[in-house]
Amino acid sequence: MDVAVLLSFVAYGVASGLWSRKRASRNLEEYFLAGRSLSGWTAGLSMAATQFAADTPLLVTGLVATAGIFALWQLWIYALAFLLLGFVLAPSWRRARVITDAEITELRYGSRAALWLRVIKAVYFGTLFNCIVLAWVLFATRAVAEPILVWDQWLPGGLFAHLQALVSWVGVPLAVDPHGPELWVRSTNNAISLLAVAVVTLFYSTTGGLRTVVRTDVLQLVLALFGTAVYAGYVIVHFGGMGSIVDEIFLRYAEGGPGGIAPLEILAFTPSRAKDASLTVLAVFALQWFIQLNADGTGYLAQRSMACRSDRDAKLASVVLTFTQVLLRSLLWLPIALGLLLLFPHDPAVPASGLQHNREVTFVRGMVELLPAGALGLMLTAMLAALASTLDTHLNWGASYWTNDLYKRLVCQAWLGREPQERTLVWVARGSNLVILGLALAVMTQLSSIEGAWRIALLLGAGMGPLLVLRWLWWRISAWGELACIAVSLLAAGPLVAGIDGEAVRLLAMALLATGAGIGVSLLTPEDPEQLRVFYARARPPGWWNPVAGSLGLEPGEGLRRLARATGAMLAAALCVLSLLTGLGAWLCQSPEPTWWPLPWGLWIAAQIGVGLAVVPVWLRLGFAGDSGFSPLPRNQ
């Protein structure tokens, strides 16, 4: 039964890739943007599927156990980034008519510096950042595969012995515990599992392009959500209901849980009752959605927005992503995370350095212990589908940089002075998928030694993120300003890591330094007014574009009015989803009201849900009412 569920999913992915192969082979727009034909619902569900990632439920389980529910706000706050993309920026991304987010630099700036900025971004996002993310997700998936996919018990003994000898010869242990028994047996099992998922994903992603990626993403998300709901149901029934789970947490951990956390701190949604909710931590939680590498949607979120068939669909995609990921997914994970604290009680002998990992792996242990045949196969398929969704998105997205920005723009047009054929570009794209996967697998073997590099990559994102948003909203931002921002981020990363212990303070310091440098240099290096007119005429971004709009014969204040309306929709939708999450989540988990709330607990729950429902008409009207979009202005204006 379990194997049948898994094989059915594999068959669907392969068939979908073959079905879309001919359309994807026409040109880059078909291959990387599905012919700009996606509906808002499918694009949004595809975004949510990629964000689901196989390692995320493990992370959530560890955070709830060691820092409480409030720690999940560092994930939930990204609702603001998703909605900023949707209501403020997604229509402009789509109207720009570019293939990749790196390509937008030449449309926005047009100078020689813009070409090199485009190349730098293609190399950084498409290779360095992308391969590290892929490697990280593959590495984390071992925890899911190892206890369930036991190939040494299924394959012929002679064949497995040869495979084990090969893995042992390579000398890279892939077992979750590198010091446990049967190291190379477990490493070989994990190697087979990861390669099997990678090869299947590579096949359908390479053959069918984004259209197949999105189609399989939707199924993967449905499987992931349904499987998680089944798992949550078994956890709740096993303990006799959510009330029993909460009561048992108070009894079991009256003297303190993992890391000394108190029961009220485990259950708290708000900072007044949370563990270690300092002002610095709250500041980072509040700002990290903005001081990060994808602040304006740069990456696969922008790719999905550009692939939508209309401005309205581009907005809807981000709304669907936000409600699916932040609200629905979280409500399914919370009962599991709390129940696992009881199913696998805290072991005081576990050292503090290994506490987070120790709690994370209970997510998979709970699957094996609680779920019967069929349900276990469904949940395993859901977890592997989450991995496949992340893989296919990052392979397709990374290949778009290699093909459109490096091969087509840099090699063919800038260096060789010729235009490549569309079919040639599609084959380059397919080959790029294979090379990127190979690089990611190579990085995965060194992952334990590059964690420091990954932290620096996140620190660099804090420096670059704000300027990525400002380039859409303010005409004064220049290519040299972006390059200065990148340069300062690179120069400041080492000293900040060496000189500041707290990661939160480092992120804030980097954001201030790099953003200040980027704005300062931009003011000293204005862009060509003609190029700004070309960009504005096509993309029609909101914000401070009065001089450019006036030179095109448009009403100067129109951009600011659109920004105000879009920002209002963004904030109202964020208030909606976060209020509903707090109200429904606190009701489900019987979480305490904040210390400053003077009224009964039930009124706190009712107030949160009431506010969430009350603002629905507000963001619907501000974000979608009368939304007919823009047509690009003629080039001669």
Image (cartoon, rainbow, N blue to C red):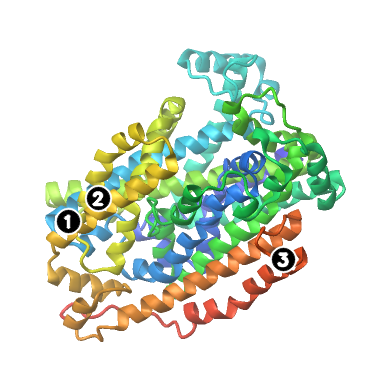
Residue positioned most to the right = 240
Gap in Å between the C-alphas at discs 2 and 3?
44 Å
Quadrant in which residue 68 is drawn:
top right
At label 2, counting other C-alpha atoms closer than 10 Å, the crowd grade (few under 14, some 14-19, many 20 or more) is: many
For the residue carrying disc 3, how many other residues have a C-alpha within 10 Å: few (<14), some (14-19), or many (20+)? many
Tag 2 secondary structure: helix
Residue 221 visible in rendering: yes
Is there CB contact under 8 Å for labels 2 and 1? yes
Q: Is residue 570 left or right of residue 381?
A: left
Residue identifier under label 2: 485
* Residue 105 locus on image (x, y percent): 24, 58
Lower sequence index among marks 3 and 1: 1
Residue 330: x and y, percent?
64, 54
Which quadrant holds the N terminus? top right
Q: Front-most of 451 and 69?
A: 69
Reading the image, the residue beneath label 3 is 605
Q: Tell me the tag on residue 62.
A: none
- Secondary structure at badge 3 equals helix
* In-front residue for pair 548/96: 548
Position of residue 163 measured from the top left corner of the image (x, y, whole percent): 55, 18
The C terminus: image quadrant? bottom left
In the picture, measured across the screen, residue 479 lies left or right of residue 473, that is left
Kind of residue at badge 1:
Val
Q: Is residue 245 above or below residue 46?
A: above
Q: Is residue 427 visible?
A: no
